[in-house]
Amino acid sequence: MHPVLNEEDSSMSCILHIETSTAVCSVAVSDDSQVIYHEEQRSDQKGTSAELLGPMVDEAMSFADSHAIPFDAVAVSGGPGSYTGLRIGVSMAKGICYGRDLKLVSVPTLELLCVPVLLRETVPDDALLCPMLDARRMEVYAAVYNRALKPVREVQADVVTADTYRLWLDERPVYFFGNGAAKCMGIINHPNAHLLENVEPLARWMQPLAERRLLNGQTEDVAYYEPFYLKDFVAKAAKDLLHMKR
């Protein structure tokens, strides 16, 4: 296993994982650092996240209860991503935490996207990872990480041009992935730019990041926690557009 995702030092805990930041609605249960249950459904094919999530969570919790495995925490994807999806996922997670007196753990969505890449792909040691979530037009929510998942550039909403990531592309390979990546590759158009397809932020990939946070005491205040919507960017973009039209 990738050293960043090695959970040999983790505490023994059972976590319910909820991910609703994109069109794929997913839940999972992990116990003692192993994913023992997971389910994914596309909300754009089988209903809305609000319609799908409740029954999926009920089935996951029933599975754990039927095996007499008590939950210790609920982990939820904390954004950025779909405003509605994130709100639905966080509301569900909070309700369960209140009802069962559980801890709440927030997993950054772009960091979560890196987990399947680190586990499944062969990426050079000096490479950088750039997870992207689709915003609109040529806009994406993106961050840049090294292979140790240390931020090289924090999460931002980018209007992608040929120069947006050139600082890093001129120095080393950069791997782009997530549902916002494919639309940007023609514009980025750099020999060090590599596209990884079919990488999604699924609940079953949350386990190592959630357990690490739980072990380190990085839990959220259930009453006041809000996901990371990047609202400031949306407001600024609308304001800039209004000035351009004058």
Image (cartoon, grey):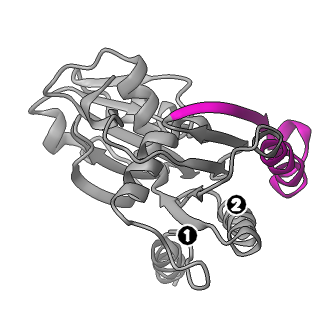
Above-or-below relation of 229 to 48: below
Above-or-below relation of 13 to 223: above
Q: In this view, does 154 lie to the left or right of 229?
A: left
**Residue 217 sits in quarter:** bottom left
The structure residue drawn at horizontal position 80% and vertical position 39%, both measured from the top left corner, is: 63
The numbered mark at residue 89 is 2
Residue in front for this viewpoint, 242 or 134: 134
SS majority, magenta: helix
Dot 2: few (<14), some (14–19), or many (≥20) neighbours within 10 Å?
A: many
Dot 1: few (<14), some (14–19), or many (≥20) neighbours within 10 Å?
A: many
**Residue 229 sits in quarter:** bottom right
Above-or-below relation of 86 to 43: below
- Residue 70 location in percent, x, y? 68, 52
Residue in front for this viewpoint, 60 or 100: 100
Q: What element carries label 1?
A: loop
- Residue 125 location in percent, x, y? 16, 24
The numbered mark at residue 227 is 1
Quadrant of the image containing the N terminus: top left
Q: In terms of sequence position, does the residue under pointer 2 or pointer 1 come before the other?
A: 2
The amino acid pointed to by label 2 is Gly
Q: Is residue 2 left or right of residue 83?
A: left
The structure residue drawn at horizontal position 29% and vertical position 41%, both measured from the top left corner, is: 162
**Whether label 2 touches label 1, CB < 8 Å:** yes
Residue in front for this viewpoint, 166 or 62: 62
Residue lying at the far left of the rendered structure: 171
The amino acid pointed to by label 1 is Pro
Residue 60 visible in this rendered orientation of the protein: yes
The structure residue drawn at horizontal position 48% and vertical position 36%, both measured from the top left corner, is: 33
The part of the chain drawn in magenta is: 34-62
